[in-house]
Image: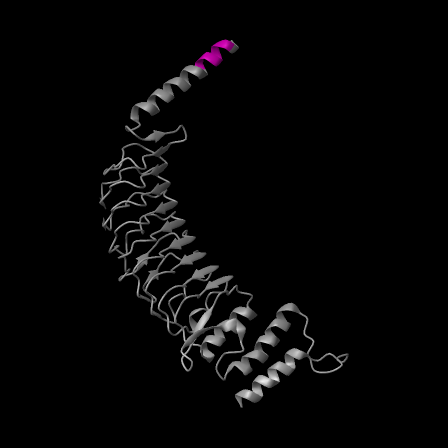
Amino acid sequence: MRNTSTSYIVLSLTLYLLHVNAKCPEHCACSLDEKIDCSNTSMRMFPAGAWKLLNMSHNSVHSIKRYSLRNNFLEVLDISNNIIEIIEGSAFVGKLRVKEMDISSNNIVYIYPETFLFTPNLARLSLANNRRLELQNGLMFSGNSLKILDVSHCNISRIDETTIKYGVSGLQELYLQHNKIAYISRDSFNSLKNLKILNIGCNNLLYVEIEMFVPLRALTELRLENNPALCNCQFGDIYIWCLTHEIKLENVTCVNCERNHKIDWLMHSDVPRCDYIYQKQIMQAKGDRNGDEKTDSKDSDGLSPVVIAFIAIAVVVI
C-alpha cells in the first residue's frame, strides 16, 4: 500500500514537472513555485502563463499596453533595464495581486496618474533611473498598501500636493534623491503620516522650509545632503527640529553667501549671525533628549568650556 502511494506521488510530481517544462518559454527558467525568469533573453513580449513572479529585466520590452500583460495571478514583476517608453493608463488593469513592481532603468517620459490605481495591493514600487520621467500630473494609488516608493535619479523638478496623491497614507519610505527638484510646497507631504524615511538629497533645493516636514510624525531619517540650500535661520530650524524629534540628519552642508562656499551646518562655528541663538537651543534640545541637562547644576565649579565658547561666539557676532 505504501509503495502504491509513493508511486502515485512520484507520478504526479513527474506529470507536473512535464507540465511546467511544457509551458516554460525557450531560454527562460521556470520553477515549481510558479516563478519564471526570462531576464537577459532579448524578449520583447511577456510570456503567457499564470506565474506569480515574473522577471523580465534586461530585455527589449518597448511598451506596456492594456493587454500586454494578461497574467492576473502576478504578485512580483521585474521589468527593469528594458527600453520601455510607454505605459498605458490601463496597463495594469486586473493586476489585483501585485505586491512588488520594479520598472527602474527604462526610458519612461510620462506615466498616467491612474496607472497604479488598479494595483490595490502594491507595496513596493521602483521607477528609479528613468532619466526623463517628470511626474507632471503626479501619481495616484489605491488601497493604502504602498510602503516603499523610489523615484530617484529621474527628471523631477518640483514637488507639490498633487505629485504623490491618494492611497499613500501607509507609505513608509520615499526616495526622491538625484533629481532636479528646486521647489517643494509646504503641503507636499501632508498625507504621509506614516513616512519614516525621506530622501531629497542631491537636488537643486535652495530653500527648505520646516513646515513641509511637520506633518511627518513618524519620520526617523531625513536626507538633505548635496542641495544648494542657503545657510540661514530657516535652515537652522530644520536642524533643531530634527534634533528634538530624534530624526537622523547627517552630512548636511549649506551655502554661506557672504563667503561663497559650502559649510557643514553641524560644525556651528562658521554659520551666520543667528547661530548663537541656535547654539543655546541645540544645547537645550540635546539636554532634553538625553535627560541629562547640567546647565543649572549647583555642583558646578564654574562655566564649562562649551559655555565659554558660546559666549565668545556671541561677543564676536555682536
Residue 148 located left or right of residue 240: left
**Image location (x, y in percent) of residue 258:** 41, 82
The magenta region covers 3-8
Q: Residue furthest bottom?
A: 318
Q: Can residue 59 be seen at all in this image of the molecule? A: yes
Colour setup of the view = one colour
- Find out whether residue 15 is within the magenta segment: no
Image quadrant where residue 230 sits: bottom left
Specify the quadrant of the image occupied by residue 11.
Answer: top left
Q: Position of residue 98 (x, y in %)?
A: 36, 43
Horizontally, residue 106 falls left or right of residue 15, namely left
Which quadrant of the figure has residue 232? bottom left
How many labels, in total?
A: 0
Q: Nearer the viewer, residue 13 or 257?
A: 257
Percent across and percent down for residue 139 are 31, 57
Q: Main secondary structure of the magenta part?
A: helix
Question: Does the segment drawn in magenta span residue 4?
Answer: yes
The percent coordinates of residue 200 (x first, y second) are 40, 63
Residue 195 in sight here? no
Q: Residue at x 44, y 14 (%)?
A: 8
11 is higher (above) or lower (below) than 292:
above
Q: Which residue is painted at 30% across and 65% down in the image?
A: 157
The residue drawn where x is 57% and y is 75% is 282
